[in-house]
């Protein structure tokens, strides 16, 4: 039976560039943590509960909850910059 | 360049099934010759980037688009339509990452508008959303195969659809030239009469609308309103978009009754506003999140579509008893909006931004 060549239809990954770990920082209090919730129903409640837990267990001055405008889209560059400027650590989570 | 594998023709189907490279139906083997014919017809090179989905760190190259279009059964003359539709799908406003991931299970619905779509093999009349026409079936199928194979939208991977629907295999509607007095969709969207445009929407399946005995525009529009305010549709009361396929009798009744397309869109925008109590009576719980704040307006109602521009009217379908179709997007506009692109003529390269 004769043979044919066929081409692969799937994404063929290029080697991703190496990403280095961020530098570990020595934090000077007061520490602010921002938790990004994805804006789905109950996500804010769930992540607020987790934020309270962090607040109780760690020497954190403030935990800020930030709600995304759409669960389906990433935050934009300006939003990311704003969050980075006001936070020592940003945690992204989702609920559904 | 894409990896090549050598198989007997008989083994291609089973090998592609085994590798999870199909939508569950047999495919046309993507030989280098068939793929080259696609690229040459469109005037693109294999490594041209048709679009990107940054959330997935994936580019769609013209070669991968062509391979999947061959597999779908497209002819080379359909490839510029596929390229334009893929380019629209990758526009950030379309929200491709979520549209092909969501539990809601959206189709990549393509609405094509052009003066002579029949010459490309598109069916615009009888069975407009049904089977039997290669162009309609294969262009829509190519979209899904690219989503599956290039972007990972498979049930075993990143497609989280709870139920899905058959439109996820293929879903395309081609516009029949509208009655005299009405402009076609592409002109309404700002394109030239001579252009071919594709509008891509992430949608639920089509909901057929029947109104067979009421010959008045008001009666037809009241039926459309009823179809468009089904509380079980996710976007009702949340501001989504709608593609309305106006069948033969309904569009004639509307145009002969003096209704312009703009007047229809304005009427339906207002008429489909619903009260929280209407939705709650159907068991729907009001959401008050940042993405879906279902606080009613000053009229005590919620928008199903926020603007007349969120309703796309397209004429298609043959004479019958009185049928149209309503195709809602699967989610509110905060997540995804329809995107339109012009189809480039043969040999003219990639779609323009």
Image (cartoon, coloured by chain):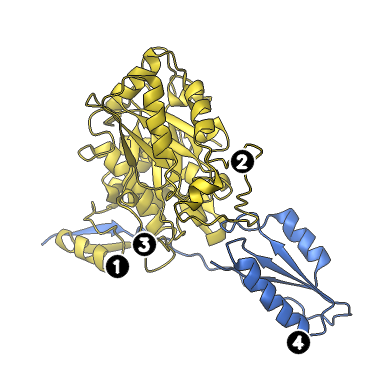
Callouts 1 and 3 close, C-beta under 8 Å:
no
- Chain letter, colour yellow in render: B
Q: Which residue is mark 4?
A: A57
Between A46 and B9, the residue placed more toward the observer is A46
Give me the C-alpha separation between circle 2 and circle 4. Answer: 45 Å
Q: How packed is label 3: few (under 14 Cα within 10 Å), some, or many (20 or more)?
A: few
Q: Which residue is mark 3?
A: B3
- Residue A70 seen anywhere in this rendered image of the structure: yes
Q: Residue at x 35, y 60 (%)?
A: B163
Q: Residue at x 73, y 76 (%)?
A: A22
Q: Are marks 4 and 3 on the same chain?
A: no
Lower sequence index among marks 1 and 3: 3
Q: Colour of chain A?
A: blue
Rendered position, B94 above or below B57: above
Which quadrant does the C terminus of chain B fall into? top right
Find numbered disc 4 in the image and state the secondary structure of the residue it sits on.
Answer: helix
Q: Which residue is mark 1?
A: B19
Q: Position of residue A35 (x, y in %)?
A: 71, 70
Give me the C-alpha separation between circle 2 and circle 3. Answer: 59 Å
Is residue B212 rendered to the left or right of residue A85?
left
């Amino acid at each position: 039976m004769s043979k044919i060549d066929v081409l692969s239809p799937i994404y063929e990954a290029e080697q991703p560039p190496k990403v280095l770990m961020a530098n570990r920082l020595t934090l000077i209090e007061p520490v602010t943590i921002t938790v990004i919730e994805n804006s789905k129903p109950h996500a804010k409640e769930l992540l607020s509960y987790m934020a309270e837990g962090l607040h109780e267990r760690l020497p954190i001055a403030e935990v800020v909850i930030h709600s995304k405008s759409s669960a389906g889209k990433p935050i934009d560059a300006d939003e990311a910059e704003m969050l980075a400027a006001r936070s020592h650590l940003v945690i992204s989570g989702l609920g559904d | 360049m894409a990896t090549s594998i050598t198989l007997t023709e008989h083994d291609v189907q089973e090998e592609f099934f085994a590798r999870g490279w199909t939508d569950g139906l047999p495919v046309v083997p993507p030989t280098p010759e068939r793929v080259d014919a696609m690229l040459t017809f469109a005037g693109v090179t294999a490594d041209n980037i048709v679009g990107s989905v940054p959330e997935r760190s994936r580019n769609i190259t013209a070669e991968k688009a062509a391979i999947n279009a061959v597999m779908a059964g497209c002819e080379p003359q359909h490839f510029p339509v596929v390229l334009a539709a893929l380019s629209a799908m990758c526009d950030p406003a379309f929200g491709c990452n979520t549209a092909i991931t969501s539990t809601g299970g959206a189709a990549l619905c393509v609405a094509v508008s052009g003066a002579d779509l029949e010459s490309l093999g598109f069916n615009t009349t009888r069975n407009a959303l049904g089977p039997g026409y290669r162009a309609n079936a294969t262009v829509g199928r190519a979209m899904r195969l690219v989503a599956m194979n290039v972007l990972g939208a498979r049930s075993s991977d990143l497609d989280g659809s709870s139920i899905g629907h058959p439109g996820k295999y293929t879903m395309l509607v081609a516009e029949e030239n509208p009655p005299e007095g009405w402009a076609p969709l592409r002109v309404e969207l700002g394109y030239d009469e001579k252009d071919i445009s594709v509008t891509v929407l992430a949608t639920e399946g089509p909901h057929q609308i029947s109104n067979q005995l009421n010959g008045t525009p008001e009666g037809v529009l009241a039926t459309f309103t009823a179809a468009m305010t089904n509380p079980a549709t996710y976007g009702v009361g949340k501001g989504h978009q709608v593609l309305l396929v106006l069948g033969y009798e309904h569009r004639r009744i509307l145009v002969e009754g003096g209704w312009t397309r703009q007047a229809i869109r304005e009427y339906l925008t207002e008429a489909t506003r619903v009260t929280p109590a209407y939705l709650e009576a159907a068991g729907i719980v009001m959401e008050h999140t940042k993405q879906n704040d279902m606080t009613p307006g000053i009229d005590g109602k919620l928008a199903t579509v926020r603007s007349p521009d969120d309703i796309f009217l397209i004429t298609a379908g043959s004479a019958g008893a009185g049928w149209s179709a309503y195709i809602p997007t699967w989610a509110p506009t905060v997540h995804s909006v329809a995107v339109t692109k012009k189809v480039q003529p043969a040999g003219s390269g990639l779609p323009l931004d």
